[in-house]
Image: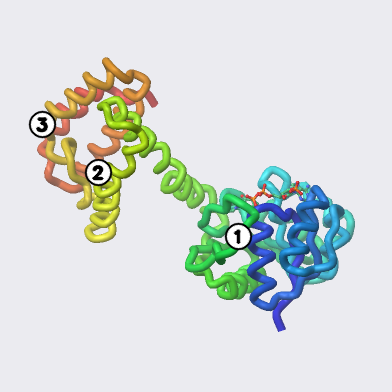
Amino acid sequence: MKPSFAIVGCGKVGTAIGKFLSRAGYGVAGLASKSLSSAKRLSEIIDADQYSRVNWEITPKADIVFITTPDSVIKDVCDTLVQHDGFCEKAIVLHCSGVLSSTILSSAKNCGAFIGSLHPLQSFVSVDVSKNPFEGVIVSVEGESVAVNAAREITKDLNAIFMEIKTDAKTLYHASAVVASNYLVTLLDLSFRLIEAAGVPRAEALKILKPLIKGTLANIEKVGIPQALTGPIERGDVETLQRHITEIRDKMPDLLPIYKTLSRHTINIAQAKGNLSESAIQKLKQILGPSMD
Ligand SMILES: NC(=O)c1ccc[n+]([C@@H]2O[C@H](COP(=O)([O-])OP(=O)(O)OC[C@H]3O[C@@H](n4cnc5c(N)ncnc54)[C@H](OP(=O)(O)O)[C@@H]3O)[C@@H](O)[C@H]2O)c1
């Protein structure tokens, strides 16, 4: 028989976990959220009758308690649950933060629960989910071994991919995900602004650049980094880099610092690829000037 679970924090992630674990046969011990309407909404989605705006009313009978509140209140929510005897003996207590480790649940550990964190590498943008958002997604897990083993089963039942991570590695792992997802948006915004300044309507930017973006991703998949790097820096084309800098300085000076920072980092990648001569490296660095950091 599958264990029972409680959700504390019926937002985007809590709703997705609640919906797809209940679909996988896990029993619903209860649902709680700051506002009753959020808990009630999830209870209607998964046909559960135990819901409340008082967290500790619905957690004591749960084998697994998910604290899916915003990161900033996970610790307080956990501590308050402990104060109100909110965990059954040997309960498994999990949060889903990417940046925080299981250690912020230590008050639960001190009262006999097993603590862990389970972070799906997925972007949840709404509480309305019809398709399983965990399908094929990496879920990084750390914590006490009992909690990690439970999370392994949960991951399997969500059709996700389990990956164990060191407790003290979470912050850098999360930073990596932020760069790959959020800063990719930032990078493309930068590219779109430049193409727009070149006279292409912004609405057309993605259509025009998409084959290039997809080709680059395919090259990274095929030959990896640094081999996938092409372009003026990789060729040691000092004149082209100088033209870019002059034009950006004239027309879009606010973009110059980030352009230079990316170029400096790209020199390192080109260097690792091994085609750049030492004199080209020095000239490129000279154009870019010293780093401001
Ligand atoms: N969104 C993502 O893409 C994503 C991806 C991976 C991991 N995560 C992690 O998942 C966790 C939840 O994020 P989310 O995006 O689902 O946030 P969210 O949509 O804002 O949901 C958080 C929920 O917690 C409830 N809540 C707030 N304070 C509470 C308290 N003191 N007691 C009980 N419930 C409380 C909120 O209240 P009401 O609705 O009741 O007002 C809300 O429903 C976070 O740790 C986040 O880092 C998020």
Q: Mark 1 sits on what residue?
A: 129
Q: Nearer the viewer, mark 2 or mark 3?
A: 2
Label 2 amino acid?
Answer: Ile
Q: Nearer the viewer, mark 1 or mark 3?
A: 1
96 is higher (above) or lower (below) than 275: below
- Residue 293 position by quadrant: top left
Q: Mark 2 sits on what residue?
A: 269
Residue 218 point in image, percent of width and height: 26, 57
Label 1 amino acid?
Answer: Val
> What label does residue 219 carry, if any?
none
- Residue at x 65% of width, y 54% of height: 127
In 3D space, how far apart are the residues under numbered discs 1 and 3 (Cα atoms)? 55 Å
Tell whether 140 sits left or right of 226: right
- Residue 134 position by quadrant: bottom right
- Residue at x 36% of width, y 39% of height: 188
In 3D space, how far apart are the residues under numbered discs 2 and 3 (Cα atoms)? 16 Å
Does residue 108 appear in the picture of this structure? yes
Tell whether 44 sits left or right of 122: right
Could you tell which of marks 1 and 3 lies nearer the N-terminus?
Answer: 1
Please tell me which residue lies in front, 85 or 39: 39
- Residue at x 77% of width, y 59% of height: 108
- Density class for disc 1 (Cα within 10 Å; few <14, some 14-19, many ≥20) is some
